Structures are given as structure tokens and as C-alpha cells.
Image (cartoon, rainbow, N blue to C red):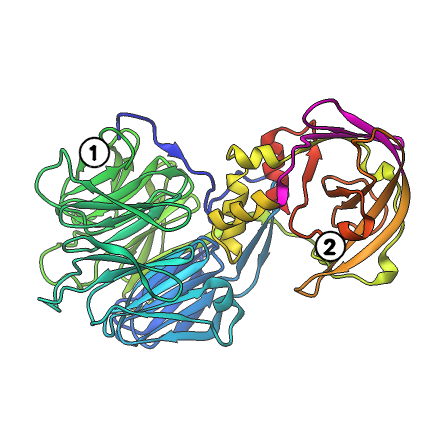
Amino acid sequence: MHARLLLPLLAATALSAPALAEDTTSAWRLFVSDHAAPKLSVIELATGDTLGTFPLASPASLYVTHSGKAVYAVQGAGNQVSAINSGIAIDDHGDHGDIEITAPAAIDTTVAGTKPVHFVEHNGKIALFFDGEGKTRVVTEADWLDGGDIATAEFDSGAPHHGVAVPWGDYTIVSVPNAADPTGLPIGVQVLDKSGTPVGDLYACADLHGEAASGNTLLIACAEGLLVVTGSGEPQVELLPYTGLPEGKSTTLIGGVALQYFLGNYGPDKVVTIDPVADEPFRLIDLPTRRVHFVVDPIRPKFAYVFTEDGKLNQIDVVAGTIAQSVTVTEPYSMDGEWSLPRPRIAVANDVVAVTDPNAGEIHLIDIATFTETRSIALEGAPYNIVAVGGSGVVHGEGDAHAHAHDDQVYKGYFEDSQIADRALADWAGDWQSIYPLLLDGTLAPVMEHKAEAGTKTAEEYTSYYTVGYQTDVNRITIAGDTVTFYGEGEPAAASYAYDGYEVLTYEKGNRGVRFIFAKTEGADAAPQFIQFSDHAIAPQDADHYHLYWGDDRAALLEELTNWPTYYPSELSAEDIVGEMIAH
């Protein structure tokens, strides 16, 4: 990895915390399960208060997705996976985020199955693997958060085994059991399409154990190396051997959040940083004693943290490949004995690393800036697995919230006919640039990633959809007075236009849109006879962007729903446009 700089990812997690402005609020919560008791506790980080304790079917491993909207409790002995609404919702508006803080609450819906072990989320889809059945159940997070019945796709690997599954767009990557040794680790992975039909051959991966995604790359740990999975459609799988490393293997992997890299274990007293596309992809980092647990920092991407059996928390500089600093936090926790014994777990929560101390019944908070313990939180029982959820945003008053809700409903296409009013061409006056070139050169990739986090498609699927939608050879339009000038291939085409009313369209989902139409009165033959604006507004106001339809047949143009060239002010930089689009 020292052969090149780590690549910055196109989109950071929703849990990352921006610098606080004067009008923003920060809220962070710790979700902690108990080593022996079937319960989950939610703690307000700022005060240390317990906001709620939720009963479970058995002790649980905890997971949080990129959205941060819920924490998922995988209860292996309880034969179910359940979810707790985090109570922290951040609505990203590009230049700021709105934060809504409510009480954490149990989500009624659970997914049942024998001995769930692995929970993997990718682009809004969640794959649950049930070791006791050898079956995978894939759901969308959106369905789960809504409660009620969940649409579930189920795939059977053929035999119970300690396996894993990863959702990958329209495909699912599933482990293949060892027929000769059903109690052993999987021997490889198979790619399945939507119907569960295998695509391609088995990808060998002896002793498969451990996977993680970073950006648009997935790694799966094998005895002989790592399977590297890429591709926007059908997954492309290649083996990356453990070149340059001593004998050994990784069995646990974590993906970097704002830098594209991976951190894995390698033997009991080492971790390895992995950059799959570098000339020298691996870098070993020696630890002072054996490793207990490790995580990456989603807010300060160059750092990761490893807790070692001597009771120390070690900060890893993943760019330099060194231990930056260490602090003693607990009494020693030996790695001798059963793997399932209670030992500390760690999570990054804003400015601190939270370390559970099951033997002492405490959670220690280590300030990252000074790397000293600032306080501890007592928690009854044996606090064990832990995840953190939070972020920063603007808290709006009731009036602001109402205005946001009203504007949002109109933007989404829900309004009354009485709200529509005629508009003048002046609403779209200015110099405008097409965003189609920005999609083609990858500039809009963060927008596609953002859509995928909350939507029903992968980032690659959204890119394909908008490639059709934004397509145009008119990369600039100017509007002054009643004159519209189109800049495409060849000479600019200018013409005068007069208002020709509006039309209301009803879409399949039940929402509606308004096209404001202008007819050509004179000008260049190359200029279209009709132009139709759609900018999500339904009454006079200055547009901040718009979709434009043009052609010579007014009625036929209203039938065009797949291609809508989109324009933003030419004065905006690419970065500005990305921010604006993410805000909407």
C-alpha cells in the first residue's frame, strides 16, 4: 500500500460528522448488548444516560448500516434478527443536514431462521446468512424500516455451514459448503442472479471466513489470498494472493469508510492494511500483544483502532502503517481460552472511542484528540458488543419543519390543482450547463452513491438510469428576455418563445408533475418548435435547475418520460452541482 496514496472514496458514510456550525446540533448514541443477558441498551453519549433497554431472544451481535437509521441485533441462539430504530435521522441537504432526534424504538418486524450469524449490507440491501440452515435471506433496509411484512428473497446453499452472503446489485454472492466436511469452513463462493440461478463457475476460496466492502470493492478472505469483487453489473471476481506476507491468512476484514482500503487481522499479533490495486497491496503492522478487537475510524479516515490483550487501545495510522499512540484502558484480557469469553469491543462515536469492559461493567470513553480516558459509563451486567450511531445537523422549529414538509411534498409531486399558477420565461433566465458530461466523466458518482443509500437501486443502476435521462448533445442553454439559445454541435440556434400554458402529468407511482410550455414565434430553423420546462415547482419562482423537453410536436413531447436533459447554472462548479444534487 505504500506504493501509492490511498484513494478517497466517492461518498462518506451517513455517520460521519462534519464540523459543527453555530446552528447545528450533534447527537450520538451507543448501542450495547450484554455478553450473557438477552438485552440491548441504548446510551446517550453526551450524558451517559440509558435511554432504553430492549429485550432480545438471546445475546446478540450488533450491526449498523450506512444509513444509521437502525441497529440490527443478530441473535444466533435466539434464531432471529431484529432491529431497533436509532432515533437519529439526518436529512442531507448538501450545504447542511437536518437532524431529527426521537426516542429509540423497537421495530416490530424480525427475520427468523436457525442460527443467524452473518449480516451484510450493501447499497441498501441486507443479506442474512443462517448457519443452521445454510440459507440466505435478502431484504431491503427500506422495507425493514417500514415495519410490517418484508419482501424476502431466499437462497439455499444446499447444506448448513458457517457461511456468508453478500448482496451485489441484482446478484447475490453466497458461500459454498465443503461437502467432504460439513462442519468445516466453505470452499468458495457462487454468484446467483435474481432467481437464484448460478452465474459462472465456483470461485475457489478455501477456508472462507471474513468479508468487507470499501467503496465499490468487496474482499472475501480465503486461505490462499483474498477474492476481490468489483463490477457495476455481474460481479467480477479475481484472487489476490498473499504476496510478500509470511505464512498465514486473514479471517476478519473491515473496509475503510472515506479512504478506499481494508484492514484485516493476520495472525494473533498483527494486522494488515490492504490496497487491492496497489503494486504492493499488503502492509503488516506488528502489535504489542495479541489482538482482541479492531475498527476503522469513519470520521478521521487515516486512523483505525486495535484493542490488545494487555488492556491497551492502540491508534493505527493506516497511511503510514504504524501505531501512532496507545493508552491503557482496562485490566488485561487474555486471549487464551474459549473465543466466546467476554472481552472488550470498541466503537468510534464522534470524538471518542468507546471501549466496553465486560468484567468491570463499564464503558470507557477515550478522547481521540488527547488519547486519554475522559470518563466512563457504568452499565449493569457485562457490556459486550457495541456500535455507535450519530451525526450533526440543524434542528428546525415547527414553522421551519412545516415549510420543509410542504416544499418537499410539492417537489415529490404531491399537490392540489389550485396550487398551480402560470409562469413566465423569466423564471428560467440565465446561462445554463448540462450535467450530462458530469455524469459521463464520473463527477456525479457521489450523487449516485447517495441515491443508492436510501433508494432501491445500486449506484451503478442509478448511473445507467440517469445516463438515459440526462443524455443530450446540447451542453449549454442561455435564456434572456424571450430568446432561448441552444449550444450544441455546430452553430448556436436562437429563437423567440411565447408562453403556451401548462400540462399536468400523472405518473405510475401516483405523483404528478407540471410541464410549463413555450412555443417558438420566430428564429433559427434548428431551434425546436416547443420547449417544456419541469423544475419540480408549480408556481412562479426562479429555478435553481430544470429538466427541459423539446421538439416540434407539442402533444407527442408530453409522452416523453425517459429522456429529460437537465441544466444547472453555468456559474456553478462541479463541486457545487454535486452538493446541490445531493441536497435534493
- Lateral position of residue 131 relative to residue 73, left or right: left
**Element assignment for label 2:** loop
Q: Is residue 499 magenta?
A: no
For disc 1, the neighbor class at 10 Å (few under 14, some 14 to 19, many from 20) is: many
- Where residue 103 appears, x then y in whole percent? 53, 65
Residue 318: tell me if it is visible: yes
Which residue is the site of mark 1? 283
Neighbor class of circle 2 (other Cα within 10 Å; few <14, some 14-19, many 20+) is few
- Residue 358: tell me if it is visible: no
Tell which tag, 2 or 1, sits nearer the viewer. Answer: 2
Q: Amino acid at mark 2?
A: Glu
Left or right of residue 483, residue 295 in this image: left
> Is 494 part of what is drawn in magenta?
yes
Question: Residue under circle 2?
Answer: 559
Nearer to us in this view, 121 or 102: 121
Q: Which mark is residue 562?
A: none
Q: Is residue 382 left or right of residue 251?
A: right
- Marks 2 and 1 sit apart, C-alpha to C-alpha, by 57 Å
Report the span colored magenta: 469-497
* Residue 201 locus on image (x, y percent): 24, 55
User: Which picture quadrant has residue 162?
Assistant: bottom left
Q: Residue 47 location in percent, x, y?
A: 47, 56
Left or right, 190 with respect to 443, comes to: left
Place of residue 323 in the rendered image (x, y in percent of width and height, measured from the top left): 24, 34
Q: Residue at x 18, y 52 (%)?
A: 205
Image height of 18 relative to 211, above or below = above
* Mark found first going from the N terminus, 2 or 1: 1
